[in-house]
Every structure is written in C-alpha cells, then in structure tokens.
Amino acid sequence: MRSRREIAPLSIYDPVYLGIDENGRPVDITLIYKNLLTAGEPGAGKSGALNNVVAHASLAEDCRLWLMDGKRVELGLWRDRAEVFVGASLDDAIDRLRELQTEMDGRYDHLDGWKLRKISRGDGNQPIMLVIDELAYYSATAGDKRTRETFSLLLRDVIARGRAAGIIVVAATQRPSADIIPTSLRDLFGYRLAFRCTTETSSDIVLGHGWHARGFDASQVDPSTPGVGLLLAEGGIPRRMRCAYLSDNEISSIAGDGSAA
C-alpha cells in the first residue's frame, strides 16, 4: 500500500485496486455508481477483499465510510476511520439504514432541483460507502423475523436507489444461499466476487445462474489458495483473480494515520 503522499489526493472516484488476475495484470474496479457483492466459505478470502476496498475508502478524501460488522472484529480495525460503525445491534443497523435512506432522498431532492441525474466529483455531495460484513447476521440471524425483514427491505432500497446519489454498498457473506442472496438482490450488484464455495449452486448464487455450466465455478477453486476468486463485472464474464492481502499491522498503520508503514 502506497503512502498518502504518493497517491494524494486519493478519491473514491478513482479505481480501487483489488489484486492481480491469473496473467499477473492488476485488477481495479471503479465503485462509484456501483455496488459490490462478495461471498465464499470461511477462510476463502472475502475479508481480504473487504479490507482492500475499505483501505481505499478510508484514504479517499471525498468518501464517508459507514461500517456494519456483527462480529465487530473483521472491520473493527477500521472503526476510527469510519463515520459510522455498527456492531451486533440489529436495531442500530436498521436505524442507520433509515438515516441513510433519508440522506439518499435529500440528495435526490437536490438533484431534481438542479435538473441533474447523479452526483459528481466536487459538487458538495460526498459519496458514502456502506460496507457490511456477514450480511446473513443482520438479514437471517439476529433479532426476530419482523426486524430482519425490515433490515432487508431498507437495504434493498438503499442498494436499488442509492447509486446515482453516491451511496455505494459493499456486502459480504460466508453463506451464499438463496435465502441470503435472492436473485432480485444479487442482480442489483454491478460487481460480484465469488471466492471458493462449497457447491456449484452456491457459486451461481453469487455470480448468476448458469455460469458454472460455462466453466466459471468457484467451487472448483483450490482450498489451498485463499484469496483466489472469480470477479464478474457488469456486462462481462468472470475473471479469475487473487486479492491483495493486508496484514493486521498494515491495516492498523493505514487506519491509524492514513498511510502504510
């Protein structure tokens, strides 16, 4: 990770570096006006992907970082760099999603008044990146059925309508099943990153129906290669890649003073 002096001023409008592909070429994704879904079995590499994305957002001078992490420890090292940090409280997560929904509606009022279709760099509306680690905790485990459904409905609205308002959602789960990632939700994510999955069906739940039959199957990723996954960009085909890895010390350095040691 380069220092702030070398990359300043970093922007959320800039491409985010994720790692390298199987030919050694850098893999960058542009997340402004997009969303990212990543999933895979425990230890497959999704936390590494999240940390690369969060590192970029934390260094970007024009991004407001919101984090939700039911375990608190996966994203906890970034807590001091975040404007909002939600832990194991589903009620708190719902309150924050409502707050984000209100912010989104206010931005659309602004855009409508100025006859604009989306926010842009330097217009005074800083993009907000919402990163959720272990989506299943909030949508299928914590609380009761009613509160989980409320969370899911609010999140779906933010994902569906938030892009032009500069609200970026990055969500991760180690339970890529149809109840956690229904097709209607998955299809709202412009980027999908599937790490090793237990079955070809789970791989297709992340990437989209039929990809395994075309030779793109995350269940075939070698379990001895954590960080290797298939990245699908909107309108493209899955690209085999390996995510860059940030150690806890590197994360602490970036989160502590905005630069790597």
Image: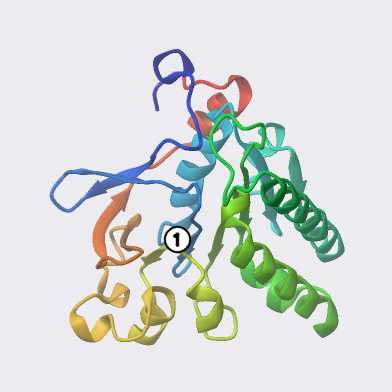
Q: Which image quarter is the N terminus in?
A: top left
Residue nearer the viewer, 111 or 67: 111
Name the residue that disc number 1 marks.
43
Look at the numbered disc 1 and give the secondary structure of its residue: loop
Residue nearer the viewer, 9 or 174: 9
Q: In this view, does 180 lie to the left or right of 98?
A: left
Residue visible at 22% across and 86% down in the picture: 213
Residue visible at 45% across and 42% down in the picture: 52
Is residue 72 visible in this depiction of the protein?
A: no
Q: From this view, report whether residue 142 is shown above or below residue 65.
A: below
Residue 140 at x, y = what percent? 70, 78
Q: In which quarter of the image is residue 235?
A: bottom left
Q: From this view, report whether residue 22 is shown above or below residue 161.
A: above
Residue visible at 58% across and 33% down in the picture: 58
Residue nearer the viewer, 32 or 194: 32
Residue 129 at x, y = what percent? 61, 47
